[in-house]
């Protein structure tokens, strides 16, 4: 049939109607027959010509785009190359085979026939992500030559039937290949550095059963050709992530039997599936295999802790801090945060920001798309990984409640506190050579910010790494820091809904934050958009856009799914890595791999509210404060500090000490709760003060919170105690804190306090008065400054002075004398 042709029938005379032998028929044709007129409303004779019917064919639309990586390691299996979507406008067609042409090296030389050892076509499981574990392989075959054209015809079979039925519902297919399986091609030339891809060239390359053309017409707008990016065959490819959820989970060590106190709070690899805690052996998601003690705390594997020099901690330095090598390069990856000197933190995505326990299970979690929900990375069984983005906040860490995204289309997102410097933890590669890194704004221009590629070299002790000029390493250092950048500070908001691969209108928290119309960065995808209203964006398509041609997947990115609350910005920076393999005098450079998708966010959070105790008079107690107002990167954590204790210990009373860095989700902390690393009950009859500050997702601290009420751990009988001042003597010529002294003391209750300062002749120099419940007169520690001036504001002479502190409280009255020295 030819579309839009007319087709009909005619009966020329009665002899055209076959009847049983001997029967006859009257040459009359009744017309206008219906149910009420079974004999019709009239008659006519032969010839009889019926009504012409216009042919309306089944249209089959095909859209496709590349999902191929820039490079793949030799022998890598099931590398996704093309994504195709087929759909009819009515009824269905049966698709029995797809004919594909090989492109790349084979088109320009006589070599290349060994670049693909196998080509497969897969039916998507409706998540639009190539996942060999769950998608259905419809067919596979090895490429061959025909009339000088290298290609392959892949037969398809589904559910035992030798064809796939394509209907009005979209059918998504993936085309994958085993790349560089053979070390040499048909001409005995090495396949390394060849380029190979696949093209669906013509609509006629879709075949029905028995090799016939499909019984459909091509959609005028959505039809081949579609081709993949050509993949460079390399000795190896750079992995997309350093850490897999198939590996042993990393936990935060809690107080438990057999663990020394100085190791509490440090990250550790969990003990998994030991003889005393066999949990069933989930080899895919090792979170389900963690051994726990009687209090449900994860048990650390102390054999995997390291010393600073990389030796085993248990045998070489058990008295020191236990450190952890996160990515297997033999270098401890711990770092400290805030004012704590203990290196209690590691980064699981390599951005230098502490990984946190998002689920309160004692396990450190990955958040690869910065939406606040646990994500996972599993080995796919074919030499690659499968990234799963969590989408259920009530069941985090469950792979069944996560959405897959492509290894070659998704890049983990990160925040940077600086616009001139970014860093990345690079995946470990067991090969001789070295890493090179570059920073760019787009995938198709990886060095637009850095200007060039630079090698990563080891600079000295304890894993100090940086980017330097070209140099060869026996083993590749795996942490890179790139400086001297000028990355624009982006306008940033967040998604207010999830996006599928073909969403073109979507909601954001604040469209006004973006410079529109123009290019935007949604998660790690680049697209073009315009503002519809204050909370809605529309993707804008242009004629020269790459497939799928709707304004998404621009500048070398891929259209992928996105979760609600992912960051959206109008600028970004991508750090790329490639590995230079060294074999004698020869070097081979792998394809560039995007490692992290950065957005600078130097804005600090606001200061949290004052820390308020929820109870008094107990050795363990809860603290709470009003949450900080976060920047776009959110509040990652709160640093909690304490001072106080023994009244006569001036250092304890004056100096703030960091207790813990806790999750930013809950602005509260329980002193003495062993679930917080290093915590224990406080001694009775003591006073303690607290302050907190917020840490943004980019690693920027807020100001400290204002001082709140002090906490007592029992009845304080002393009216005043712990009287001291610092510095003593002090130099009024100096500026800042050094140019004044702070008088500190502890009150047993809210009191009226008068501090009178005398010179050595007994003359009054200055009087300071404080009422109950304010600084200077509140229960617990008080800190009062004297700047060395008299009541008239004139600096006093150098020499000795006497401070008399007179207290009237519900417990009685008391007076204390303190000597203070002033120098010039």
Image (cartoon, helix red, strand yellow):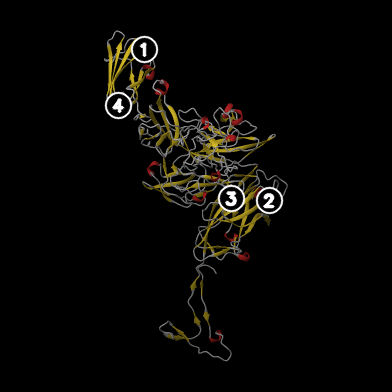
Q: If the image is split into quadrants, where does the N terminus sit? A: bottom right
Front position among marks 2 and 3 = 3
Front position among marks 3 and 1 = 1
CB under 8 Å between discs 3 and 4: no
Residue under pointer 2:
113
Q: If the image is split into quadrants, where does the C terminus sit? A: top left
Q: Residue at x 73, y 47 (%)?
A: 188
The image position of residue 242, as x and y in percent, is 56, 39
Q: Residue at x 65, y 53 (%)?
A: 118
The image position of residue 819, as x and y in percent, is 35, 13
Above or below for 36 versus 304: below
How far apart are labels 3 and 1 at the CA level?
77 Å
How far apart are labels 1 and 2 at the CA level?
90 Å
Front position among marks 1 and 2 = 1
- Image mark for residue 750: 4
Residue under pointer 1:
821
- Image mark for residue 80: 3
Front position among marks 3 and 4 = 4
> Mark 2 Cα within 10 Å, few/some/many (few <14, many 20+)?
many
The kind of secondary structure element at disc 1 is strand
């Amino acid at each position: 049939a030819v579309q839009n042709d007319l087709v009909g029938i005619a009966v020329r005379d009665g002899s055209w109607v076959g009847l049983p032998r001997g029967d006859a028929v009257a040459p009359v044709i009744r017309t206008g027959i219906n149910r009420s007129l079974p004999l019709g409303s009239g008659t006519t004779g032969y010839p009889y010509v019926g009504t012409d019917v216009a042919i309306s064919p089944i249209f089959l639309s095909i859209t496709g785009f590349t999902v191929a990586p820039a490079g793949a390691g030799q022998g890598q299996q099931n590398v996704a190359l093309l994504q195709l979507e087929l759909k009819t406008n009515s009824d269905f067609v049966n698709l029995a085979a797809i004919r594909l042409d090989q492109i790349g090296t084979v088109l320009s030389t006589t070599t290349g026939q060994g670049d693909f050892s196998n080509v497969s076509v897969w039916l998507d499981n409706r998540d639009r992500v190539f996942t060999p574990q769950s998608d259905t392989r419809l067919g596979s075959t090895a490429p061959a030559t025909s009339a000088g054209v290298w290609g392959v015809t892949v037969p398809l079979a589904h559910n035992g039937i030798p064809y796939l039925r394509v209907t009005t519902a979209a059918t998504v297919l993936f085309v994958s290949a085993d790349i560089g399986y053979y070390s040499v091609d048909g001409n005995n030339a090495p396949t390394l550095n060849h380029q190979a891809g696949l093209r669906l060239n013509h609509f006629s390359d879709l075949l029905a059963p028995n090799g016939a053309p499909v019984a459909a017409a091509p959609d005028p707008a959505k039809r081949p050709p579609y081709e993949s990016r050509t993949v460079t065959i390399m000795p190896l490819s750079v992995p997309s992530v350093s850490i897999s959820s198939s590996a042993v989970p990393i936990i935060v060590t809690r107080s438990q039997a057999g663990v020394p106190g100085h190791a509490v709070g440090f990250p550790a690899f969990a003990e998994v599936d030991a003889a005393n805690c066999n949990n069933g052996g989930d080899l895919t998601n090792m979170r389900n295999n963690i051994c726990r003690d009687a209090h449900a705390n994860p048990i650390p594997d102390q054999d995997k802790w390291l010393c600073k020099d990389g030796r085993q901690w248990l045998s070489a330095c058990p008295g020191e801090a236990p450190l952890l090598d996160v990515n297997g390069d033999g270098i401890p990856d711990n770092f400290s945060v805030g004012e704590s000197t203990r290196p209690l933190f590691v980064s699981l995505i390599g951005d230098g920001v502490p990984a946190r326990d998002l689920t309160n299970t004692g396990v450190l979690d990955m958040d690869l798309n910065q939406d606040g929900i646990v994500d996972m990375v599993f080995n796919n069984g074919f030499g690659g990984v499968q990234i799963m983005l969590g989408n259920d906040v009530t069941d985090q860490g469950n792979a069944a409640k996560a959405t897959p995204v492509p290894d070659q289309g998704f890049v983990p997102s990160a925040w940077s506190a600086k616009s001139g410097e970014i860093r990345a933890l690079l995946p470990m590669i067991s090969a001789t050579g070295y890493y090179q890194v570059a920073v760019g704004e787009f995938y198709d221009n990886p060095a637009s910010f850095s200007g060039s590629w630079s090698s990563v070299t080891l600079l000295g002790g304890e894993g100090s790494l940086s980017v330097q000029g070209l140099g060869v390493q026996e083993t590749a250092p795996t942490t890179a820091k790139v400086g001297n950048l000028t990355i624009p500070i982006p306008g940033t908001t967040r998604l207010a809904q999830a996006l599928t691969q073909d969403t073109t209108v979507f909601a954001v928290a604040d469209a006004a934050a973006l410079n529109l119309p123009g290019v935007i960065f949604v998660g790690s995808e680049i697209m073009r958009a315009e503002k519809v209203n204050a909370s809605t964006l529309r993707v804008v398509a242009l004629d020269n856009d790459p497939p799928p041609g709707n304004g998404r997947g621009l500048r070398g990115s891929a259209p992928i799914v996105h979760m609600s609350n992912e960051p959206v910005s109008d600028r970004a920076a991508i750090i790329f890595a490639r590995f230079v393999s060294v074999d004698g005098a020869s070097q081979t450079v792998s394809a560039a791999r995007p490692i992290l998708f950065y957005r600078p966010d130097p804005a600090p959070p606001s200061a949290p509210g004052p820390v308020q105790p929820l109870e008094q008079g107990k050795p363990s107690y809860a603290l709470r404060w009003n949450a900080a107002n976060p920047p776009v990167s959110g509040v990652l954590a709160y640093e909690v500090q304490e001072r106080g204790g023994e009244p006569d210990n001036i250092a304890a009373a004056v100096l703030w000490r960091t207790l813990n860095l806790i999750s930013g989700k809950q602005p509260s902390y329980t002193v003495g709760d062993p679930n917080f690393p290093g915590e224990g009950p406080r001694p009775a009859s003591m006073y303690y003060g607290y302050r907190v500050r917020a840490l943004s997702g980019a690693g920027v601290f807020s100001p400290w919170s204002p001082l709140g009420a002090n906490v007592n751990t029992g009845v304080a009988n002393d009216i005043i105690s712990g009287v001291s001042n610092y510095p003593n003597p002090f130099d009024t010529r100096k500026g800042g804190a050094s140019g004044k002294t702070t008088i500190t003391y502890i009150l047993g209750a809210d009191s009226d306090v008068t501090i009178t300062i005398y010179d050595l002749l007994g003359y009054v120099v200055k009087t300071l008065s404080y009422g109950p419940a304010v600084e200077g007169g509140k229960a617990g520690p008080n800190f009062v400054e004297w700047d060395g001036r008299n009541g008239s504001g004139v600096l006093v002479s150098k020499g000795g002075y006497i401070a008399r502190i007179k207290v009237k409280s519900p417990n009685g009255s008391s007076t204390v004398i303190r000597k203070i020295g002033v120098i010039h």
